[in-house]
Each structure stands twice: as structure tokens, then as C-alpha cells.
Image: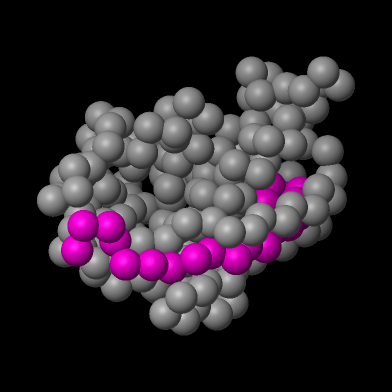
Amino acid sequence: MRSPVLSASDTPTRASLADLLPPGDGASAETITATVARWEADECLLRARLAPAGVSRADQVANLSGLEIFEAISAGELPAVPIGETTDIWPMGYGPGWFVFQGRPSARFFNPMGTIHGGWIATILDSALGCCVQTTVPAGSAYTTAELKVSYLRALTPAVPLVRAVGQVINAGKRLGFAEARLLGPDGKVYAHATTTCLIFERPGR
């Protein structure tokens, strides 16, 4: 399935989930620097392809599966999701049962203690969780989050220039979807972990 990750030649690639993950914890400083540079380049190329932010009309998505909706968004055929601009969170890759978002933990997301607010961390994790479930949803169906649980493992500051939220489906049926996600730095460290339960239902108006 096509991924929104772009190559240096500005063409979509069929990136696998493994291609989007950071090196393992304990990577060298040189490897971490190269990872950050690659993630920066991926984001620039992806954002150049996205349409302006907005809301898709019901008739535009009524006959599309979850994966087809993401394909259309990544190709600029449907509007980009508005919350991405607000939170500086961007979809970097996806496939059946998985989704990867990238975010920039900048000072504008600080809490009063000078670290990244837990709500921002929850938002990027929730995005990866919900969208990985959505990749399993057929045309004519939608989903909503029924439960979200986040565990914060490490403080996050702008000293970590970029993070990626990696969401993977545990199980998805006709009515319920279960998924987990990790928030990873370019050094491979895990900053937070989350799980979700999503309710899958027929899209209204069908």
C-alpha cells in the first residue's frame, strides 16, 4: 500500500514500517544526527505534497475505505487535516494496521514546568492509534475513540528535535478496534506508550 513518505526524487515510496523507525536505543551520536536529518527531509517533502488544511465533504469520502482516504490526503486530493498545522504533527507513513506520525516538540507546547505538555504527547499518540485503526475500516464505515490510556515514561523537551508516534493495531473487528502506540525519539528511546479502544460504526447517512 502506498505510503505518504517521499523519496529524494519527490515520488511516493512503498516504505515499510521498519523503514520509518529510529535506530535502537544506544545508537551513536552520528547515527542519531543522520536520523534527524532524514526525518526533517521526509517531513519537508511530505508537506510539499499536502493540500491546504480543511474538512473533506461527506460525498468525497463516502465510498472510500480508511486506507483510500489516507492515500487521497497524502496525494493532495483531499484536504490536509487541520489539527496537523495547529500541533505541528504530520503523517509520515501508513499501511494496513499501522500508522506513523511525526511531531516537533517545541517550546510553544510547554507546560508550566518547562517540558512538553502531556496533552500534546497524548494528541500525537491518539493520532497514531486512531489512524492505524482507520486503516482497517472499510468503505462506508467510520470510527471514534472510546478509550485512551497514556503512560508517560520520560520527560520530553525541545532537546529532542523530532519524535515519531508509531501506532499498531492489536485487533480490529466489525465493531471494536484495539491498538497500541509508542512515542519514539531519533535515538530510539521510548518517551510514552498508549493504548486505545475504538468503536467502529456505519457512516451516518448511508
- How is the protein colored in the picture? one colour
Boundaries of the magenta span: 181-206
Q: Can you say which quadrant of the picture contains the C terminus?
A: bottom left
Report the side of 128 relative to 160 (left or right): left
Position in image of residue 20 (x %, y %): 51, 59
16 or 180: nearer the viewer: 180
Report the side of 56 relative to 137 (left or right): left
Q: Give above or below for 90 relative to 24.
A: above
199 falls in the magenta region: yes
Residue in view at x 56 percent, y 38 percent: 103
Position in image of residue 123 (x %, y %): 59, 42
Q: Can you say which quadrant of the picture contains the N terminus?
A: bottom left
Report the side of 133 relative to 26 (left or right): left
In the picture, residue 56 is in which quadrant? top left
Can residue 80 be seen here? yes
Residue in view at x 43 percent, y 50 percent: 92
114 or 147: nearer the viewer: 147
Can residue 161 be seen here? no
Residue in view at x 64 percent, y 58 percent: 147
Q: Main secondary structure of the magenta part?
A: strand
